[in-house]
Image (spheres, rainbow, N blue to C red):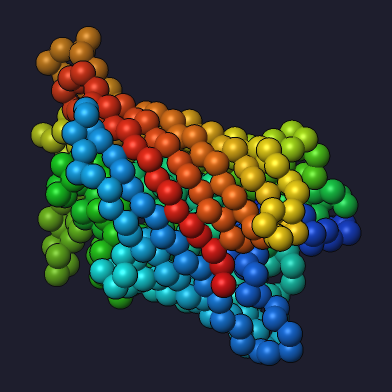
Amino acid sequence: MLVQMNSLKHLLIGYAVLLGAQSFAQVDTLVTNQDAIYNRPFIGLGESRTAVGGYLEGNTNYFSEDGVSEGLSMELRRFNIFLYAPVGQRIRFLSELEFEHGTEEIALETAQLDFEINPQLNFRAGIILPSVGYVNTNHDSPNWEFVERPISSTDLIPTTLSEVGFGLHGKLYPSEKSIFSYGVFLTNGLQDGVILNTEGRTNLASGKTEELFAEDNNGVPMMNGRVSYAHRSIGELGLSYYGGVYNTFRIEGEEVDVRRQLSVISADYSFSVKKLSVRGEVVSVTVDVPDDIEELYGEKQLGGFVDFVYPIYQKPILRFENAMINAALRIESADFNQGAFSTNIDTEIGDEMKGFAVGLSFHPKPGTLIRANYRYHLVTDVLGNPAARLAGFQFGLASYF
C-alpha cells in the first residue's frame, strides 16, 4: 500500500508540473475516454440552453448451466434520461437518471457541475462517476457490441459506481496529434459491505449503499485519479487508481476496528488497426481483510477483458444509408480470490470466472444497434471443484434518443 501511495504521490507531482507547462495547439476532435460523459448525441442541440436525451436498452436471455436452463426471458434492462445545460460561461451541468428493469431500481447516476478555469484546469463537484477503469465513465449501452458489461468492470470494479465528491480534471496538448488528460477526485467512497456481504466473497459492489450519497461512514474520503495519453496513430492508454479506508473503524469517537484499506489499480487501452478496433482493461484489487476470514474473502483479485470489433459490411441496408454490420469477440476473466489455502499451499483457492463472447450487431445509424450475442463461461467455486459451464444466447437492442 505504501508503494501505491508513493506512486500516486509521484502522479500528483506530475500533474502539477504538466499544468504549469506550456500547452500547444488544442485538438478537440481527438476524443478521449474522459470525454465520454459529454460525448453524447443530445449535447449541443440548436440554440436551446437545456438539452434532454438518454438511451433505451432491452434484450432477451436464454442461458443454461451444465445443461439446465430456465428458458427464455425478456427484459427492459435500462431506460436512462440525460439532462444537460450550459449554466453560464464555462459552467456546465449534467445529470443522468437510470431506471433498471422497469422501475425495479431507480438511481441518480450523475448530477454534476463543471467549472472551466481553462482547458487544462477544471473543477467538478456533485454526484460524479469516478474515473476507474475504462467502462465506469463510458458505460452507455449503445457504445458496446455486447449486452453484458465485462465481468472485470462489474464484479471487480463496481460499475456503474456513482459517488458524491469533487476534484480537478483537464487536458493538455503536447502536439497537434496527441492529448494528455488527467483527473483527481475525493469521494465518500465504498463502505463496510465490501466484505461480510450476501455474495460470500470480497465484492466491491456490495460496498455501495444509499448512505454514501449522504455521508462518509468513517470520515476519511477515498481518492481517485486517472491519467491517459491519446495519440491519433496509436490510440489511448489510461492508468487509474481508486482507494482508501472502507470500514467503519470509529463509532461516537471510539476506535472499534483498525483502518482497513482497499485499492483498485487499472490499466485501460483502446486503439485501431485499420478497420479493427480493440479496447480493454486489466484490473487489480487489493483489500485489507481480517485474518480469520481472509481465505473466504480474498485479499487480492485480478481480471480484465479485451474486445475486438470489425465492420464486415458497410453499405445501405433497408434504406438506411449509413448502415453497418459489425462482428465482435470478447475474451475476459476474473479471479475473485488469488492465492492458496493456508492448510495446503499447493491447493489454490478457486472462485474465478473466465470465458468469451461472440456477437453480430446491426447499426442502422450511429448510436443505435441491434445485437446478437453468444456467451460461454467457466465458473469455478472457492474449493476449485470442476468448473460449471454457463452458456447462452442474447438478442437485444440499444439506442440513444
Q: Decide if residue 389 is on the left or right side of residue 317.
A: left
* Nearer to us in this view, 225 or 63: 63
Query: Which quadrant does the C terminus fall into?
Result: bottom right
- 187 over 179 or under it: above or below: below
Q: Quadrant of the rendered structure where residue 394 is? A: top left
| Residue 39 x %, y % | 65, 65
| Residue 340 x %, y % | 23, 19
* Nearer to us in this view, 165 or 384: 384
Residue drawn at point x = 34 percent, y = 66 percent:
100
Residue drawn at point x = 23 percent, y = 44 percent:
71
- 87 over 359 or under it: above or below: below
Q: Quadrant of the rendered structure where residue 57 is? A: bottom left
Q: Decide if residue 23 is on the left or right side of residue 349.
A: right
For residue 58, say whether it is visible.
yes
Residue drawn at point x = 32 percent, y = 33 percent:
391
Q: Which residue is outermost to the front?
A: 318
Query: Which quadrant does the N terminus fall into?
Result: top left
Q: Decide if residue 183 is on the left or right side of residue 397.
A: right
* Nearer to us in this view, 291 or 204: 204
Residue drawn at point x = 22 percent, y = 9 percent:
346
| Residue 254 x %, y % | 13, 62
For residue 152, say whether it is visible.
no
